Amino acid sequence: MPKSTDNYRPKLPERDWAAIAPYVHDLVARAEPVVVYSSAELYPAVARLAHYAFIKHIPLNDADVLAPRTLERFIQVYLAEYTPGSKSTMRARIRRVAEAILGGSTSDLIRTFAKTEASRPYSAKDISLLRAWARSMQNDDLTSSSGALLALGFGAGLTGAEIIRQRIEDVSLSERAVIVRGKKSRAVPLNGVWVELLTVRHKILSGTGWAFRTGQQGTNQNLITDFVARSGPQVPLTTRRMRATWLVGHLDAGTRLKPLLRMAGLESAEALDNVLPFAED
């Protein structure tokens, strides 16, 4: 080990650093010769990643610490208060370490991270910003349509295709539920604010019409993407992340598995694998 690393000491509790230091020194020593970063550049990222694993009771071995799920949770949770630039720097360095130690191409790792990112739930702040965006539309029809988009995604967990096909007639305000038609027909209960947004949309349409985007035909697969691209919300909006937010919300609330699968239109619990890392322990 290079002598210059012997004195490295992060700002962590003494007992925590004593527990993780051997693994951190070893991982940096193995990674430095095969990545573009120096040990001085690697230590802050590796030490904090190991500390996250330690406090989450994740075994300090390469397979567990460098697993994509651990890395993504580390970035989203442990680094939550970091600036975007600092977070990006940390992400790049631990990606290269994981690639060097576990093998696999950079593109494989990037695809893994991108897939995980697509399933990352929105934060409460993100949702507040998206609701503000929906209220900022030019007229009542667009405002209620945008509100319905958020309600069907965040409140009912519908897929993008299901949102596009959803009729306002199939929203039961009295029973506070969305009736989904088609191959995966089901009733999905709604709560609070999402009922209110669909109530507004119901009034604007006089009880009949497309829940999202008046005048469409229910067949344009790019309808939501095009609408979001034109209206430009501050927070990037995707139906996959809205659905992930809904799923994680139910998991955290203790919704039983079989009812959740029925509400989500899922056939097996394996379909939850992408969102489980974001649920409470």
Image: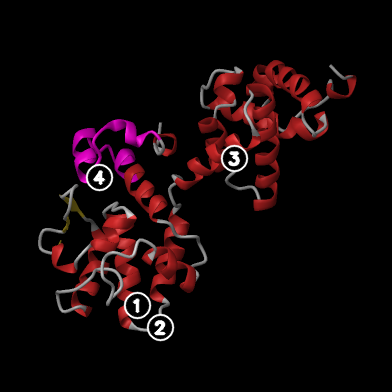
User: At 73% from the left edge and 34% from the top edge, which residue is drawn?
Assistant: 44
Q: Which residue is mark 4?
A: 264
Q: Is residue 143 rendered to the left or right of residue 177?
A: right
Q: How many marks?
A: 4
Q: Is residue 216 above or below residue 14?
A: below
Task: Name the one closer to the observer, 54 or 180.
Answer: 180
User: Tag 1's secondary structure?
Assistant: helix
Q: Which residue is mark 2?
A: 138
Task: Name the one closer to the observer, 129 or 271.
Answer: 271
Residue 142: numbered disc: 1
Residue situated furthest left in the rendering: 174
Residue situated furthest right in the rendering: 3
Foreground label between 4 and 3: 3
Q: Is residue 8 rendered to the left or right of residue 183?
A: right
User: At 38% from the left edge and 49% from the top edge, which residue is drawn?
Assistant: 245
Q: Position of residue 23 (x, y in %)?
A: 68, 17
- Quick check: is 271 in the magenta stretch? yes
Residue 110: numbered disc: 3
